Structures are given as C-alpha cells and as structure tokens.
Image (cartoon, rainbow, N blue to C red):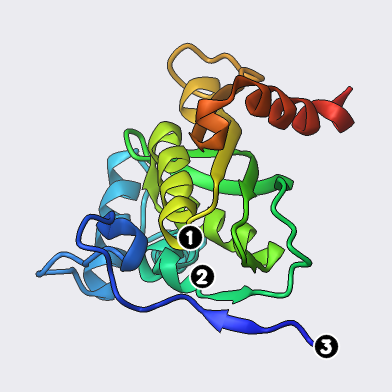
Amino acid sequence: MDAVVKPWPKGTNPQSSEHVHKAPEPVADRPSREQAESAVRTLIAYIGDNPAREGLLDTPKRVVGAFEELYRGYGEAPAEVLDRTFSETGQYDDLVLVKGITFNSACEHHMMPFTGVAHVAYMPVDRVVGLSKLARLVDAYARRLQTQEHMNAQIATAIEEILKPRGVAVMLEAEHTCMSLRGVEKPGAVTVTTQFRGAFRDDPNEQIRFMSMVRASQR
C-alpha cells in the first residue's frame, strides 16, 4: 500500500509563533530595485572606488540580484515547507536524524556571511515529514539576516509546532566571517549552538544519544 500523504491542518494556534506560519511582512515603503541599485553605487563610492568605471557599471544590478537569491527566505513560510506528511510509518516513533545539512546565512549585525552545518532530529508521533523538507526548513530561516542562536531556536520551534513530535533536537555549527575576516580575525573558530525540546530536553540520555549519533561519522 502506498504511503498516505496528508497536509497539516491550516488553522493557526493563537499561541503559536508567528514566524512559523507566515513569511516576514515587507516594510510598507519597500524601496524599488532602482533605489536598491543606487544604494549599491553609493556604497561603492563610499569605499573609494568609482561606480562609473567599466568593471563596476553592472555591479549594482548583480549585487541586487545576488541579494534576492541570498535572502530568498523572506519569501518563505516555514509551515508550508512542512505541510505534507506521511502517515504510513509502521508505528515508527524513534529518533529521525538528518545531519550535516549545509547552510549559508548572514550575520544581522555586519551583513557578513556565516556558513556551517545543521543537525536536525525529531521523534515522530503518527506521521513523518519528507527528509528533504527538514533541509528546506533550515534554508528558509538561514536565507535571512540572522544570529545563529535565533536561527537555531526558530528551526526547533517550527518543527515542534507543526509536526508536534515527542521531542526535537537541533544543533548548528558555523564559522562566522564577521569574526574570521574582521574584528578579532580568528579563522577556523566554530560556534556551536543547540536546542532541545520535549523528550530531548527532559531526558539527558536522549541528548547524549543525539550528540553521539551526530559525532559518529566525524571521528
């Protein structure tokens, strides 16, 4: 028998987190593309170069195009990413772990990149989500201006509120260029953050099991 695919209910719990169920609202007076390109020309001039020289003529257009790609998470609603689930699980209710999910984000303090990997686990109840959806969820939050701590909590909250599993564990490991290329200039320093919810929060043995599985292939 084929797996039964079901959407999660569309109704929003009034106690739920707004960021889970809708994409961020754009500012009311969002600048036009032409204004954005003009701002890039201003920054080029500010750093001491000539935005009118041949090599930089098309740079503002390219930069704005790159921004649209790098920050596409502002157009995504995480609840929609996790919308389709599978109920044919053979009563599986143990840990599901997807580790080593690469991501690229940008520090909201300096707008400089930070890159790393996410390890995401949950304990399903009745239904599971397609594994690629967890990677898409990570990207939905990563492709915004972020702090690693906030992004970590957002991913865990989205899984907890939409899938309603017995437990959620999310670990992020990332290198921040705002620390490696400027300021203290310490390349290679890795920041690690974790979030444990439900069974993972309440049972230290589940935390140990999660960490052991994440580290198993890294030894």
Dot placed on the residue nearer the N-terminal end, 3 or 2: 3
Mark 2–mark 1 CB contact (< 8 Å): yes
In this image, 44 relative to 105: left or right? left
| Residue position marked by numbered label 3 in the rendering | 1
Is disc 2 placed on a helix, strand or loop? helix
Q: Residue at x 38, y 70 (%)?
A: 75
Amino acid type, label 2: Val
Q: Position of residue 151 (x, y in %)?
A: 43, 42
Say whether marks 1 and 3 touch (CB < 8 Å).
Answer: no
103 or 41, which lies in front? Answer: 103
The location of residue 122, given as percent across then percent down, is 61, 48
Quarter of the image holding residue 212? Answer: top right
Q: Residue furthest bottom?
A: 1
- Mark 3 and mark 2: Cα distance apart in space: 25 Å
SS at mark 1 in the image: helix
Residue 81 tag number? 2
**Picture layout, residue 125 above or below residue 184:** below
User: In the rendered structure, which amino acid carries the disc numbered 1?
Assistant: Ala
Cα separation, mark 1 vs mark 3, equals 33 Å
* Left or right placement of residue 47 versus residue 187 in this view: left
Image quadrant holding the C terminus, namely top right
Q: Name which residue lies at 53% across and 59% down.
A: 137
Residue 25 in which image quadrant: bottom left
Crowding around mark 3 (Cα neighbors within 10 Å: few <14, some 14 to 19, many 20+) is: few
Q: In whole angstroms, how far apart are the C-alphas of marks 2 and 1? A: 8 Å
**As rendered, which of 47 and 119 lies closer to the eye?**
119
Q: To which residue does mark 1 refer?
A: 140
